[in-house]
Amino acid sequence: MRIFPILGWMLFPGCWAVTGPGAVRGPAGGSVAVRCRYWAGYEHYQKFWCRAGGWFCSNGVIVETDGSEAEVTRGRVSIRDDHTQRAFTVTVENLTPADAGTYLCGVDRTGPSDLRATVELTVSPANSSPPPTERSSSTSSSPSKPTFIWTTAVKWKSSFSSNQDTTSPVSQLSNVHFLLLFLWKVPIFLCIIWVNIRYRKNSREMPDKHAPS
């Protein structure tokens, strides 16, 4: 039945407008780059990265764009948006075990809720010893830190940030609007199901009423 996809879109509008890698991994001491994509029409909206607290951000925004393609850096984390590719990239430098966890990458949309995707970050232990190499008379340069790039995509504060801000009242208001919208959509959902059941029941009874006596 087509009714259920339509009701899902009504209850959770735009839930597929942002896509991320789902789960990513990086080594301790290295760096990672997470690429998140979004639908057309959201090019000039602010993009953000934060730790997840359920479906919402927790502890504040880690880093956020201003709606342009200019790179924004906060502590060890930077974010850059590409309007042409409709994707933004979040880069985390010098990974530590404390960085492991669930994050949200998303679009800061004015309305009942933001658009976001969940990303699970795992930090693996750094190699205890480097692989054996051949001796050389020339001085070898120190190896560069590995960078891992994921194709994909949050809005409060985190330990990544060197300068933490206060919790944004706009984010709290956005969450309240989402809850209110959910509360009035649930009765509509139940009414549509009830009407569908009544319609199917009446359709089965109509042949009996018109049958010849």
Image (cartoon, helix red, strand yellow):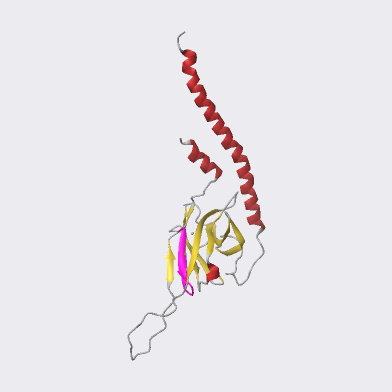
Q: Position of residue 62 (x, y in %)?
A: 58, 65
| Above or below for 167 versus 5 | below
The answer to which of 117 and 170 lies nearer the viewer is 117
The residue positioned 44% from the left and 78% from the top of the image is 128
The residue positioned 52% from the left and 39% from the top of the image is 7
Left or right of 95? Residue 162 is: right
**Location of residue 151 (image quadrant):** bottom left
Q: Is residue 104 visible?
A: yes
Left or right of 26? Residue 138 is: left
Q: Position of residue 9 (x, y in %)?
A: 51, 43
| Above or below for 2 versus 54 | above
Highlighted range, magenta: 21-33
The answer to which of 78 and 110 lies nearer the viewer is 78
Q: Is residue 70 visible?
A: no
Instruction: Verify whether residue 26 appears in magenta.
Output: yes
Left or right of 148? Residue 45 is: right
Instruction: Verify whether residue 106 appears in magenta.
Output: no
- Main secondary structure found in the magenta portion: strand
Q: Residue furthest bottom?
A: 137
Q: Residue furthest front?
A: 128
Q: Position of residue 84 (x, y in %)?
A: 44, 58
Q: Residue furthest top?
A: 213
The residue positioned 51% from the left and 22% from the top of the image is 202
The residue positioned 58% from the left and 33% from the top of the image is 191
